[in-house]
Image (cartoon, grey):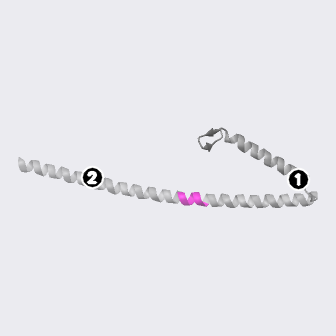
Amino acid sequence: MRNGDYEYYEDDATGWSAFIAGALIGAGVALLFAPQTGSELRGMLRNYASRAKDEAMEKGRAAWDTAVERGREYYEQGQEAVQEAGRTAKEYAQSGKEALREARESSHNRG
């Protein structure tokens, strides 16, 4: 479907499902016509699976490290914000005390 100059799909899940189904069918056909023997093919598949697992683990570790680092940054920013709010509240309370003291002095001087 077209909307102006941009194409968009109403259901991305259908597109991904079709892609994955096509990839699986293609892999199956490739296995049927592979020139390797069964044991060679199993060895290749084991190596591929091992590499894929290692890559997934590494990406998972990297994502975890990134999440932990961002968490630390957000925590530190939160601490700074709380400290700044505390300072601001103290300054506000002090200015209120001073204004009250000045009002009392002003009323005593008039009376």
Helix or strand or loop: what does disc 2 sit on? helix
| Residue 52 screen position, x and y as percent | 76, 58
| Residue 74 screen position, x and y as percent | 49, 56
Q: Which residue occupies the extreme left position in the image?
A: 111
Quote the CA–CA distance across marks 2 and 1.
Answer: 77 Å
The amino acid type of the residue labelled 1 equals Leu
Helix or strand or loop: what does disc 1 sit on? helix
Question: Between residues 78 and 7, which one lies in front from this camera angle?
Answer: 7
Foreground mark, 2 or 1, reads 1
- Magenta stretch? 65-70
Left or right: residue 76 compared with residue 32: left
Left or right: residue 77 compared with residue 12: left
Residue underneath mark 1: 31
The residue lying at 66 percent from left, 57 percent from top is 60
Q: Residues within 10 Å of mark 2 (few under 14, many from 20)?
A: few
| Residue 21 screen position, x and y as percent | 79, 44
Residue underneath mark 2: 93
Disc number at residue 42?
none
Q: Earlier in the sequence, mark 2 or mark 1?
A: 1
Looking at the picture, does residue 1 appear above or below residue 89? above
The residue lying at 87 percent from left, 60 percent from top is 43
The residue lying at 37 percent from left, 57 percent from top is 84
The amino acid type of the residue labelled 2 equals Ala
